[in-house]
């Protein structure tokens, strides 16, 4: 299946790498115009209220851009309050997604799984599904939900939607670039055996690859596909 333009919509800087980094790198290598929209500033949850240091926000934005360069992805960032997306009207979040949708005009879209533990991820999942609802006259778009390590697998609620991937992309061509892009996020990394460690990313890719006969894979859930 071939695509012209791809868009990944994520809540926080590093989510886009964890969720679809290897796939985006591979698509970019194939000549696809790949973009990522990161909706949050990614720092504020460490501080009280809106008291977030501008220098830390700028540093994380620089790391986001570096990750994009490694993956071959054009980055777009907005400044929704970190881990407080629920305080923003959902319609406003949808409008942010729709604006980039209009700019990029993607034919494949990656976003958070709707059963994650992180509440910002849930807001993004709902906003993307709404922004890309299949209205008459809309071009066909494939929507895929991704796994975010240290969020998707940590939701203990029996009412949470399970992540049951039914779409797998070969991660081998882009895996080490995914790892390098994650390494650009110096303050978001953790030590093994944390799932958000560099080795954790490799282990997860090998585990998913093993389930489908590949050396490494990125898993997705097909949310909607309208054949053109």
Image: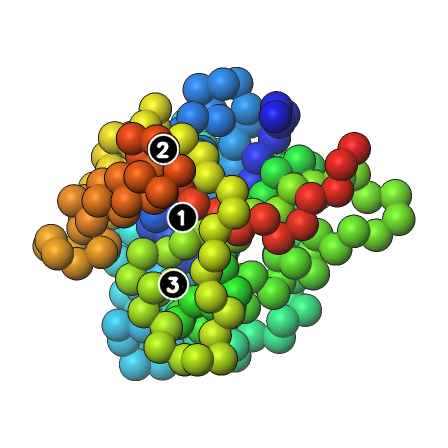
Do callouts 2 and 1 mark residues in contact (Cβ within 8 Å)?
A: no
As helix, strand or loop, the secondary structure at mark 1 comes to: helix
Residue 168, image x and y in percent?
46, 39
Which quarter of the figure is the N terminus placed in? top right
Question: Which residue is labeled 1 in the image?
Answer: 19
Q: From the viewer's perspective, is the residue at label 3 or at label 2 nearer? A: 2
Gap between marks 3 and 2 measured at Cα: 23 Å
For residue 124, which quarter of the picture? bottom right
> Is mark 3 in CB contact (under 8 Å) with mark 2?
no
Q: Earlier in the sequence, mark 2 or mark 1?
A: 1
Q: Position of residue 8 (x, y in %)?
A: 51, 44
Q: Which label is found at residue 210?
A: none
Depth order, front residue of 179/45: 179
Helix, strand or loop at label 2? It is: loop
Q: Quadrant of residue 193?
A: bottom left
Quadrant including the C terminus? top right
Q: Which residue is mark 2?
A: 213
Q: CA distance from mark 2 to mark 1?
A: 20 Å
């Amino acid at each position: 299946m071939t695509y012209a333009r791809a868009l990944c919509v994520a809540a926080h800087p590093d989510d886009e790498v964890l969720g679809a980094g290897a796939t985006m790198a591979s698509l970019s290598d194939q000549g696809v115009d790949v973009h990522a929209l990161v909706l949050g500033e990614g720092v504020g949850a460490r501080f009280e209220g809106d008291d977030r240091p501008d220098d830390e926000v700028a540093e994380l934005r620089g790391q986001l851009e570096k990750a994009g360069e490694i993956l071959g992805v054009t980055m777009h960032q907005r400044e929704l309050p970190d881990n407080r997306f629920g305080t923003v009207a959902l319609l406003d979040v949808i409008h942010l997604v729709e604006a980039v949708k209009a700019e990029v005009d993607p034919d494949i879209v990656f976003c958070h799984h709707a059963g994650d533990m992180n509440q910002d991820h849930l807001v993004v999942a709902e906003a993307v599904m709404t922004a890309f609802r299949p209205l008459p006259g809309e071009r066909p778009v494939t929507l895929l939900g991704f796994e975010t390590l240290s969020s998707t697998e940590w939701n203990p609620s029996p009412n949470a939607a399970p992540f049951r991937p039914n779409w797998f992309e070969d991660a081998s061509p882009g895996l080490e670039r995914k790892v390098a892009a994650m390494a650009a996020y110096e303050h978001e990394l953790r030590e093994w055996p944390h799932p958000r460690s560099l080795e954790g990313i490799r282990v997860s890719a090998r585990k998913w690859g093993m389930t489908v006969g590949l050396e490494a894979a990125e898993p997705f859930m097909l949310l909607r596909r309208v054949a053109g």
